[in-house]
Image (cartoon, rainbow, N blue to C red):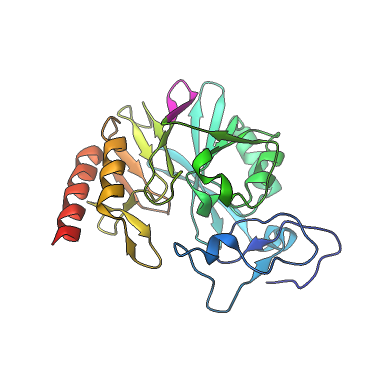
Amino acid sequence: MTTSIAQDPIGWICETCGVQSTPSVLPPSRCLICSDERQYVGWDGQRWAAPADLRISQQVAFTDEDGVTTLVLAPGFGINQRAFLIPHAGGNVMWECLATVTDEAVARINELGGVTAIAISHPHFYAAMVEWSAALGDVPIYLHAEDRDWIQRTSPNIRLWRGDRLELAASIELVHLGGHFDGSAGLWWTDGPRGGGALFPGDAIQIVMDRRFATFMYSYPNAIPLGPRALLDLQRRVAPLAFDDVFGFSTGRQMIGGAKAAIDKSFDRYRSAIAA
């Protein structure tokens, strides 16, 4: 899919992580995100996609995942994360982001009440956040300030937030989690979708395949575990949050019912494993 040159500057998108770069005529020599030890450069080398090509090759699919409107790219692309529309009285917050924007997806989102803000957990999911913001009416993009150095494409719509919590709506808060990245954040929907609250932790907390437990890693693709000090800090930040459900970053990875107790057990299990 890589194109060697463009007529005008464009925001090239890394094919491995799906994060968009500052517009340029030639593709960048490397992706800063994938050059970091938490990610990786694709086995075929650094490859870039033009946004116009992705709009042709990809569609944005909408599904209901246990009461939450979920967006994914079809076919899958990059890390293949999903985005969510979290409703509130004024519209929706888009949690996480995808690598391409389509007119059809924007029209569907507007039918669902529009988006008042975009918020993203950490740099691996920044994707085409600037293009999404513009397409949805120049809505603000909330990123934690601890991750400011990882922003590859700047915009006046980016809002760097600081501290432990940021309220986006009456029942929606951003929570600074740390762990995977210094600024890793989660979204806490305090009364939804089933009344008991839900946590959307990006992959600061990763639900494992049997979905009874979660794990906590510094790097998932490169299998670098999270150390005991960072684990303790993450557990401290999660402890005050009340939630019944957890929705992970990829399709199907959710715990529905009893999630707070399952996450607490997961912290204990992980701590025992790294101490053995």
Q: Position of residue 35 (x, y in %)?
A: 54, 66
The residue lying toward the viewer, choosing from 133 and 27, is 27
Residue 24 location in percent, x, y?
77, 60
Main SS, magenta residues: strand
Q: Quadrant of residue 250?
A: bottom left
245 lies above or below 10 = above
Q: Is residue 245 magenta?
A: no
Which residue does the image show at 60% across and 66% down from the upper left?
Answer: 15
Specify start and end residues of the magenta stretch as a single range.
Answer: 165-173
Q: Position of residue 198 (x, y in %)?
A: 35, 35
The answer to which of 133 and 147 lies nearer the viewer is 147
The quadrant in which the N terminus is found is: bottom right
- Quarter of the image with the C terminus in it: bottom left
- What is the x, y in percent for residue 220? 38, 62
Quarter residue 17 falls in: bottom right
Q: Is residue 189 above or below residue 134?
A: above
Is 104 rendered above or below residue 165?
below
Q: Residue 268, can we see it?
A: yes
Looking at the image, which residue is at 66% across and 40% down? 133
Side of 169 relative to 228 (left or right): right
Can residue 17 be seen from the camera position used here? Answer: no
The number of discs equals 0
